[in-house]
Image: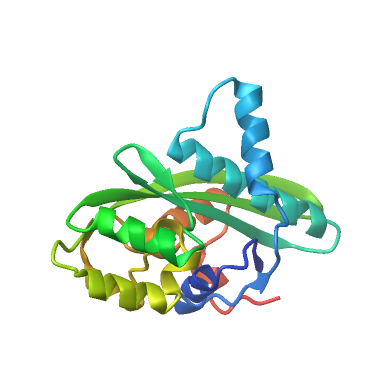
Amino acid sequence: MQVCLASTSPARLMLMRQVGIEPQLASPGVDEDAAVAARETALGRGLSPAEHVQFLAKEKAKAVAVSLADDFSGLVIGGDSMFELDGRVYGKPHTPERAAERWRMMRGRTGILHSGHSIIRIDDGSLTRADATAEARVSFVADITDDEIDAYVATGEPLGVAGAFTVDSLGGAFIERVEGDPSTVVGMSLSTIRRLVRELGVEWTGLWSASS
């Protein structure tokens, strides 16, 4: 069965490959800020962190599934993540200044990484979907120094990831504890994806070595 990852995230692609799945890749092309703004206007309120990531995961999976529906048979996987600390949510910092500021704020504290998942099964042009959110609590070491923060930020790694940290690369040494599925912090909860895949009538092991 074919698998398409509706993402350009290297971390999500790495996760798929680590568990034996070689997906094809497709950029969703979703204007995330505009989509969220429109959704919040329609609801007349702001989205919670869990609602935010789940909504964007659905939008990404849907955009790719619609584009593939005529000549694709398999699963389209969409995901989105954001980090919450003290009730405030943080996406990608993009700039070194913002990333360093966040790390000084996060040291010695615990936040929540929210991850939304949406999987669409395409079968003879028919689309069925399963969705779920997952979260993991992330605790940062208290003794990370300003020099260590500056050195980490200078690598560029934290600039393009939700919350300005990774657990599976250079940032991992500055994370003291993860409560929950650790793959959630990398980009997607693998246990959640497996459950959704089975809800759609597909056995997880049948996806091993799946390719385009």
Q: Position of residue 103 (x, y in %)?
A: 30, 60
Q: How is the image coloured?
A: rainbow
Residue 206 falls left or right of residue 138 = right
**Residue 92 appears in view:** yes
Q: Nearer the viewer, residue 48 or 12?
A: 48
Residue drawn at (45%, 75%) of the image: 156
**Tally of marks:** 0
Coordinates of residue 84 in the picture (x, y in percent): 36, 45
| Left/right of residue 175 with respect to residue 32 in the rendered view | left
Q: Nearer the viewer, residue 136 or 3?
A: 136
Residue furthest top as drawn: 44
Quarter occupied by residue 167: bottom left
Give the x, y percent position of residue 142. Answer: 14, 61
User: What residue occupies the far right of the structure in this picture?
Assistant: 70
* Screen quadrant of the N terminus: bottom right
| Residue at 67 percent of width and 70 percent of height | 25
Give me the residue at 44% from left, 67% from top.
Answer: 96
Position of residue 72 relative to residue 199, above or below, is below
Report the residue at 79% width, 59% height from top: 68
The answer to whether residue 1 is seen in the rendering is: no
Percent x, y for residue 70? 86, 58
Front residue of 172 and 181: 172
- Quarter of the picture containing the C terminus is bottom right
Q: Classify residue 9 as left or right of residue 185.
A: right
Say whether residue 151 is left or right of residue 22.
left
Q: Is residue 180 above or below residue 146?
A: above
